[in-house]
Image: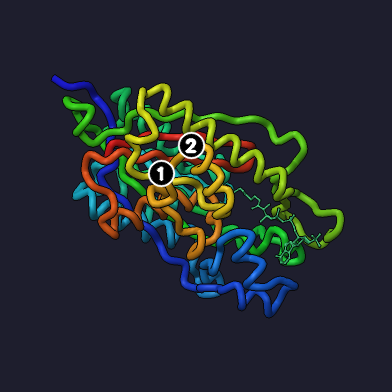
Amino acid sequence: MGSRRSKIVGTGLGYPARIVTNDDLAKKIDTSDEWIRSRTGIAQRRFVDLENGQTITSIAVEGAEKALKMSGLDPLDISFVLCCTATPEEWMPIEAARIKDVLGLERAACLDVNAACSGFLYGLHLADALVKSGAHAHILVVGGDVFQRILNWEDRTTCVLFGDGAGAAIVSVTELNDPKKDSHILGSRVYAALDRDNNLTVTKKDPEFPARTQLLTMNGREVFKWATKCMAQACMDIMTEQKISPEEIDWVVPHQANIRIIEKVAEFLNFPMEKVYVNVDQWGNTSAGTIPICLAEMNDKGLLKKGQLILVTSFGGGFTWGSILIRW
Ligand code: UT7
C-alpha cells in the first residue's frame, strides 16, 4: 500500500468585472503606460465592481465553484475551507464561512488565513499537512484579495501595482505508489520574519491623510530586494530537500508582483523564462490571488500535464514567503 499524500484535483478563478488599463490610471494620477510597463510589466489589472455588489466573496465563490466542478466531488465531501486573504469582507463573520455558506458546504469547518501575498502558499502548506495527517480528506483552499479597498490613490508608486483577484484549489487525499508519476504534493517550506522597518504595511492611520484609514504603504525598493532573495532561497531549499535539480522542473509559478522580480529569481536559479508562468501583465499583483489564478489559468490552457513538476514560490507582507513542489 502506498503512503497517504495530498494532490490538487481541481482549480478555478473568479473574474472581477472591471478592467483598468495603465492609460485609464494615467487619466487620474500622475503616471504613464510606459512607466508602469517598463518598471513592472503590468499592462492592466482587474477590480471587482463594489458598487454593483461584487466582493471578495463573489470572486472567491466563482473560483471555488469551478474548482469543485473540476474535482467531481460532492459539496458534502469538503470538510474544511481555508480562505487565504488579507482583505475579508469583514473581520467577522470570517470569509471562509461566507464562502462555505454560498457553496452549501454543509460539513466544512472554516478558517481564514492571513499571510498577505503568501496566503495561498501557506494555505496549500496547511491543507497538505491536514490531509497527510488523516484529519481531512478534501479541502477547499481559496486565495484572493480586493486591494482596491486599501489602495492609496495619492501614492502613485504603490497604487498602480495592484489589482483584485481570487482563485481556488481542491486538495484531496491520494495514495502514493510511484513518486515519479503519481500526482501529489512533494513538500513545502514556509518562512516568516517581522518586517521591522514597516516596508509593507497597512497602516491604521496615515499621518499625511488623517481622514483615511487602512491604507497600504510600501517601500518598493526594499521589498523588491527581500522578495527576490527570499523566493530564490525558498526555491533552492525545497529543491535541495526533495533532491530535485532545476533541470527537472517543468514550470515555475512565482508570485506575480513585478516582471523584474520574476526575471531576477529565474536568473538566480538558472531557470529559462519559457519555464516561468507570467500573467502579471494582465492582472497586476492580486496578493493572495496570484498563485491560484496562475494555476487555474495554466490548467484551463492545458499547460499542466500529469507527471510534470511544478515549483511554486511566493513572497508577501509580514514578511512571509515560501515554496512548494507539486507533481501534477
Ligand atoms: O506583493 C508584495 C511584493 N511587492 C513587490 O514585490 C513590489 C516590489 N517593488 C517594486 O516592484 C518596485 O520597487 C516598484 C515598481 C514599486 C518601483 O520601481 P523602481 O524601479 O524601484 O522605482 P523607484 O521607486 O526607484 O522610482 C523611480 C522613479 C521615481 O522618480 P525620481 O525620483 O527618479 O524622479 C519615482 O517618483 O519613478 C517615479 N515613479 C513613478 N513615475 C510614474 C514612481 N511611481 C511612479 C508611477 N508613475 N506610478
Residue placed most toward the observer, 60 or 193 = 193
**Which residue is rendered at x = 24% and y = 33% of the image?**
173
The quadrant the C terminus occupies is top left
Asked if marks 2 and 1 touch (Cβ < 8 Å), the reply is: yes
**Which residue is rendered at x = 23% and y = 27% of the image?**
179
Residue 93 visible in the current orientation: no
Left or right for 151, reference 171: right
Residue placed most toward the observer, 113 or 125 = 125
Q: Secondary structure at mark 1?
A: strand
Residue 165 drawn at (x, y percent): 48, 59
Figure colour scheme: rainbow
Left or right for 177, reference 39: left
- Above or below — where is 326 with respect to 104? above
Residue indicated by mark 1: 252
Left or right for 178, reference 136: left
Disc ID at residue 155: none
The quadrant the N terminus occupies is top left
Disc ID at residue 269: 2
